[in-house]
Amino acid sequence: MTGFERQWQARFERSATRHQSDHLVSGWSATGLRRRVAIFEELLDRGFVPARARVLELGCGAGTYVRLLAKRGYPVIGLDYSVPSLARAVAAGLPHAGRYVAGDASRLPFRDRRFEVVTCIGVFQALERTETVLGEIARVLEPSGVTVVETLNPWSLLASARRLGAFVRRQPTRLRYSSPGAVERTMVSRGIQPIRRVRIMLPPRSLPRLERTLGRPWLRRTLEVVPGIRAVAPQAYWIVGVKQ
């Protein structure tokens, strides 16, 4: 684990010690987590995640997605390197609502081909290198298994503002941004074929009331077809892939 990654681990541990709400433990805004959960439920409803599949939620934080999957009948394990975050997840869970394991995403404590689905949301921005983790995801996925990974959009307006602020202050950026194309190429090199990109578009923290508007299908379709806006509007991408 690099120094950058250790700083993030310590940050997550502090957040879980100080806060109880899932979004604060994970470092999202309330709106950001709520939108991600809604989009995840859409993927489940559309069948991208096979029913009753064995799922690993990699970087589970306070267990938001673990509880959601367990309620839908999935046998699910949540893994995180922040023990205080796992304690929050266990405290918030229901009986038989998933299991939790402390571990490092770059050295997963599971045998090969253990899972049919691996989700990895809100993790890549806290990694120095994503290649090792994608390799581990591929290793523990069974053939034809599905993964959903998130990467922050390096071309978004928010990312550009953050990089400019870091440059002015002569400080390194606190987040890692990887283009979806770069992530997809790495997935292919690890034997995972990308099949879908999902744009994650969120309102500014100062304008949370825009959340409902951004969730409307007509606006989402409009933002996805206008070339310039399509590139800068999403704060992140979810990439769905299938192991070959």
Image (spheres, rainbow, N blue to C red):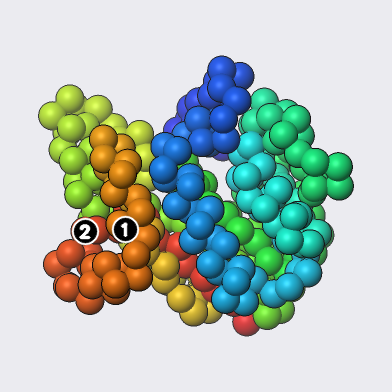
Whether residue 192 is visible here, answered yes or no, is no
Task: Give the SS element for disc 1.
Answer: helix
The answer to whether 137 appears left or right of 38 in the picture is right
Whether residue 20 is visible here, answered yes or no, is yes
The correct choice, above or below, for 17 with respect to 185 in the image is: above
Q: Which mark is residue 214?
A: 1
Q: Number of marks in the image? A: 2
Residue 47: % across, % down: 62, 76
Q: CA distance from mark 2 to mark 1?
A: 14 Å
Say which amino acid is labelled 2.
Val
Residue 174: % across, % down: 35, 34
Which residue is under mark 2?
232
| Residue 230 lies in quadrant | bottom left
Q: Residues within 10 Å of mark 1 (few under 14, many from 20)?
A: some
The answer to whether 199 appears left or right of 47 in the picture is left
Q: Nearer the viewer, residue 178 or 66?
A: 66
| Residue 103 lies in quadrant | top right
The correct choice, above or below, for 227 with respect to 99 in the image is: below
- Mark with earlier residue (2, 1): 1
In percent of the image, x 30 and y 37: which residue is there?
Answer: 205
Residue, far right? 96
The correct choice, above or below, for 187 with respect to 109 in the image is: below
Q: Which mark is residue 192?
A: none
Of marks 2 and 1, the one in the foreground: 1
Q: Residues within 10 Å of mark 2 (few under 14, many from 20)?
A: some
Say which amino acid is labelled 1.
Leu
